[in-house]
């Protein structure tokens, strides 16, 4: 049913790929409210001389440590969740500093995106190492679909299509789910939910790009 007709697609609100950029979770509304504060903090950090690249690397280190803690402290997943939170804060601030200091660059964007993917590998790698009662193949599928979501966006944007915001589970949403369930001690449930979100978002983005290209060419 992925390549169903436009009429049948429009009958299903969750799979309305023509309006996919409008599909978002509450987080997308929160971003606009958080942005002024992040810009203010970014401006202050920029004046202190801190480079956005340094913040990117610090965020990546926090993500690596999160994977390590998932692996070596399976009884305390909240520690890994806290480290993901710190990584996310750095991820917000590096962009804020780059914009405030007018140091936004393609090189920085490329580095940031690459380290984000490596961070996901580290986090899920730690979960695989300890198990948490989850079959390794499930965690691998979760990681695979998470990476595919990012790949489809990158490929779509290389074809001059706007993909940001398309789908119900972007990276931030997926990490928030993992954080919440890790803090609650239910890593296994968080992984399964992330798998569903990532898989569904991959399908949404793939069909969205496919249909746009079909119209374009």
Image: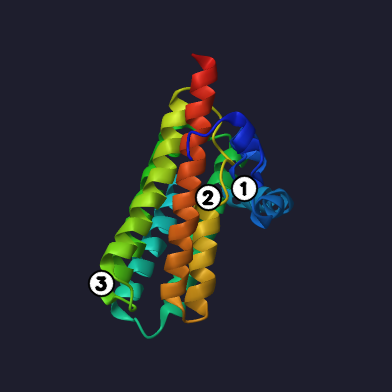
- Residue 148, quarter of the rendered image: top left
Labels 1 & 2 near each other (Cβ < 8 A)? no
Mark 3 surroundings: few (<14), some (14-19) or many (≥20) residues within 10 A = some
Judging by the rendered image, the residue that carries numbered circle 3 is 129
Of the image marks 3 and 1, the number of the one nearer the N terminus: 1
In the rendered image, which residue does mark 2 sit on?
170
Question: CA–CA distance between discs 3 and 1?
Answer: 34 Å
- Name the front one of labels 1 and 2: 1
Residue at 49 percent across and 72 percent down: it is: 82
The answer for how far apart the CA atoms under marks 2 and 3 are is 25 Å
Specify the label residue 2 is tagged with.
Answer: none
Q: Please tell me whether mark 1 sits on a helix, a strand or a loop.
A: helix
- Residue 9 is left or right of residue 133, and the answer is right
Label 1 crowd (10 A; few <14 / some 14-19 / many >=20): some
In terms of sequence position, does the residue under pointer 2 or pointer 3 come before the other? 3
Kindly indicate the quadrant of the structure image that contains residue 106. top left
Residue 94 visible in the picture: yes
Sequence-first disc among 1 and 2: 1
Question: What residue is at 38 percent from the left and 41 percent from the top?
Answer: 111
Could you say where residue 84 lies in the image, as x and y percent from the top left? 46, 65
Distance, label 1 to label 2, CA atoms, is 15 Å
- Between 154 and 2, the residue placed more toward the observer is 2
Quickly name the residue at label 1.
14
């Amino acid at each position: 049913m992925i390549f169903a007709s436009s009429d049948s697609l429009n009958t299903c609100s969750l799979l309305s790929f023509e309006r996919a950029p409008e599909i978002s979770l509450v987080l997308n509304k929160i971003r606009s409210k958080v942005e002024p504060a992040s810009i203010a903090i970014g401006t202050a950090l920029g004046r202190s001389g801190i480079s956005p690249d340094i913040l990117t690397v610090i965020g990546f280190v926090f993500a690596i440590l999160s994977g390590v803690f998932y692996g070596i402290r399976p009884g305390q997943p909240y520690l890994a969740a806290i480290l993901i939170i710190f990584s996310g804060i750095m991820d917000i601030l590096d962009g804020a500093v780059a914009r405030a200091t007018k140091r936004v660059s393609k090189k920085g964007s490329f580095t940031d995106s690459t380290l984000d993917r490596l961070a996901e590998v580290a986090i899920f790698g730690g979960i695989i190492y300890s198990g948490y009662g989850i079959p390794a193949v499930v965690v691998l599928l979760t990681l695979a679909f998470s990476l595919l979501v990012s790949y489809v966006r990158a490929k779509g944007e290389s074809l001059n299509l706007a993909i940001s915001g398309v789908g119900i589970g972007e990276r931030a949403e997926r990490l928030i789910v993992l954080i919440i369930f890790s803090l609650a001690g239910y890593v296994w449930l968080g992984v399964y939910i992330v798998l569903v979100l990532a898989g569904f978002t991959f399908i949404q983005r793939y069909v969205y790009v496919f249909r746009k290209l079909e119209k374009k060419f």
